[in-house]
Amino acid sequence: MDRVAFAAFASAVVSLAVIPSAFADSPYAFKAGTDIWWGSTKIDNTRRDDADSPSVYIAYHPSRSALPDISYRYTSVDGGNFSAFDKHDLSLYYNVVSHELMTFDVGITGTQYTDTHYRRAGSSTAYEFNDFTVNLYSYAEINIPESEWHIIGQFEVGNMNGIKSTDFIAGLRYEIPFDSMSISFRGGYRVIDLEFSELVPSSTTESFVFVDGYFLGTEIRF
């Protein structure tokens, strides 16, 4: 059922992307990037394996349009024997603040977890959490005056299907502008915090998967 819900959510988003906008007065804009995240896993409050995790993302921005912006982000985390997961985030959001010194977006994110496993210490039983959740989404940039530096932050939080989740990024972006595009280098700190209330059927305690660490990446806007 979760896969069906995610497919329906994705179909609705793609349909929006291909609808011509009668309100758009300027060309569409796209953003794409990739990060390498040097994460460290903590399973049930105990530090476990490191996880060098790749992440890629793309966003579609219909400028001055009644349609929301759309973005997709894929993150793969391999935490060894105790936990691993692929995280697919599909977001719909609006820019609510647009100023030369700051931008701020808010919306919702549909998240599908795939290829998952979780195992408690001392147990040989692995559990899956291939579930779909809907989360609140926000993104902000603060431009440092008279420079190409930007302070960036992204926050997703939700509580659905027995998963209480937080995905948080804070860092810096340095932009190199060109005539019709720009290239950016960015880095910072990312945290994914997952709390499961019903993952282990025989347990009355919650299960925890926590990943945190620094990331570096590049981004192109055109």
Image (cartoon, rainbow, N blue to C red):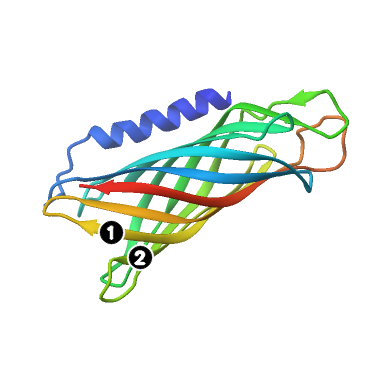
* Position of residue 93 measured from the top left corner of the image (x, y, whole percent): 38, 50
Query: What crowding class fits label 1: few (fewer than 14 Cα within 10 Å), some (14-19), or many (20 or more)?
Result: some
Q: Disc 1 designates what residue?
A: 175
Disc nearer the start of the sequence (2/1): 2
Q: Disc 1 on helix, strand or loop?
A: strand
**Looking at the image, do the residues carrying marks 2 and 1 touch, with CB atoms under 8 Å apart?**
yes
Q: Disc 2 designates what residue?
A: 150
Q: Residue at x 60, y 45 (%)?
A: 39
Q: Disc 2 on helix, strand or loop?
A: strand
Q: Which of 18 and 183 is in front in this view?
A: 183
Q: What amino acid is at disc 2?
A: His
Number of numbered callouts drawn: 2
Instruction: Residue lying at the far bottom in this picture: please name it.
Output: 145
* Position of residue 115 measured from the top left corner of the image (x, y, whole percent): 60, 24
Q: In this view, does 201 lie above or below 43?
A: above
Q: Nearer the viewer, residue 112 or 153?
A: 153
- Residue 9, quarter of picture: top left
* Position of residue 111 measured from the top left corner of the image (x, y, whole percent): 52, 37
Q: Which of 212 and 159 is in front in this view?
A: 212
Q: What amino acid is at disc 1?
A: Glu
Q: Residue at x 83, y 29 (%)?
A: 201
- Report if residue 8 is visible in the image: yes
Q: In this view, does 150 lie above or below 18?
A: below
* Position of residue 135 measured from the top left corner of the image (x, y, whole percent): 53, 47
Query: What crowding class fits label 2: few (fewer than 14 Cα within 10 Å), some (14-19), or many (20 or more)?
Result: many
Q: Quadrant of the N terminus?
A: top right
Q: Which residue is drawn at 56% across and 39% down?
A: 52
Q: Is residue 36 above or below residue 82?
A: below
Q: Is 32 left or right of 213, judged from the image as shown? A: left
- Report if residue 167 is visible in the image: no
Q: Is 131 left or right of 90, judged from the image as shown? A: right
